Image: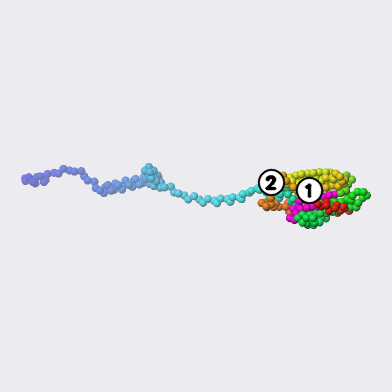
Amino acid sequence: MPENSSSANAKQPVGKPKIPVVFWLLLTISLSLVMGTVLLSNDMKHLKTVGHYFGFDLFPPEIKTPPPRALPRPTPPAIFTLPVHLIEPPMAQTASTFLRTWRISGPAMCAALRTAGIQTSDWAAASFNADTFECFFEHSGKREKDQLPNSVFVIVRGDAAGTINNMRVKIINPETDQNGQLDPGILRIFETMLQQPQWLDFHETLNAIKNLRDIKEDGFGANITFTREVLNAGRYNFTLSLDATSGPQKRTRNYFSGRIWLPSPDPMAETGSRQPESVSKPADAGAPAESPQHRR
């Protein structure tokens, strides 16, 4: 036999069988289905675990919108309690402690005396000095034997603006009752003069005058005296004046000056001025025996 033919027909060695590509494709699909089933089962618990293991979150938690909050309740209005002294009218008892001033004008003082039954003249310029203004009252009774007639003299002096400088009263042989106390009709003069300025820190003056006793009271610039004349029995002099001469009084007056403060309300304006009841003038209360120099 020819040599070439024998070599061609010689048996070739058997190689490994080749796996078709379709097999690997089917295997991959099968494994993917199995793994997907496992990962997606049990509410994708395994899939979430795998994602958490590799550091990413496949299903971020759902952000729920918070429910609308109820509107806050309205805050009740704040309540403030003011101290009583801020809304109460000024008290005359305390006002005179800090500043002694005339709390009544000259014309008003004269009107108060007329309301009390003391028929003073109108507030007008004095005859001896046009810069001085005044109102006055004179009354006298009949002369009895060797005694001087009963007489009453009242004068209120000040300036053209109505500011009072002083008030004076002179009584001669005044009427008294069985207890030696001053006649109520004359006592009404002193009651009015002491009440109207509202200097209520003078407590003993009126009682001393009622019993015709000498008295002198000084307080923060105000001077009140009621004295019996030494050489003339039966004659009594009353003076009420305001003279701020000390350092503390002057400094206080300057501090409370009306040039830098608003005027304080008149406590008598709301309730009305309480004037003493009118009394009839005693028929023999005194006579105008005082000469014009008594008014000077």
Tell me if 128 is positioned left or right of 58 in this view.
right
Residue pictured at 73% horizontal, 45% vertical: 220
Q: Is residue 285 visible?
A: no
Tell me if 9 is positioned left or right of 210 in this view.
left
- Region in magenta: 155-171
What residue is disc 1 on? 240
Q: Check disc 1 and give the amino acid type.
A: Leu
Q: Main secondary structure of the magenta part?
A: strand
Q: Check disc 2 and give the amino acid type.
A: Arg
Q: Position of residue 146 (x, y in %)?
A: 92, 48
Q: Secondary structure at mark 1?
A: strand
Q: Secondary structure at mark 2?
A: helix
What residue is disc 2 on? 251
Neighbour tally class for label 1: few under 14, some 14-19, many 20 plus, Cα within 10 Å? some
Above or below residue 271? Residue 208 is above
Residue pictured at 87% horizontal, 52% vertical: 289
- Asked whether 249 falls inside the magenta stretch, the response is no
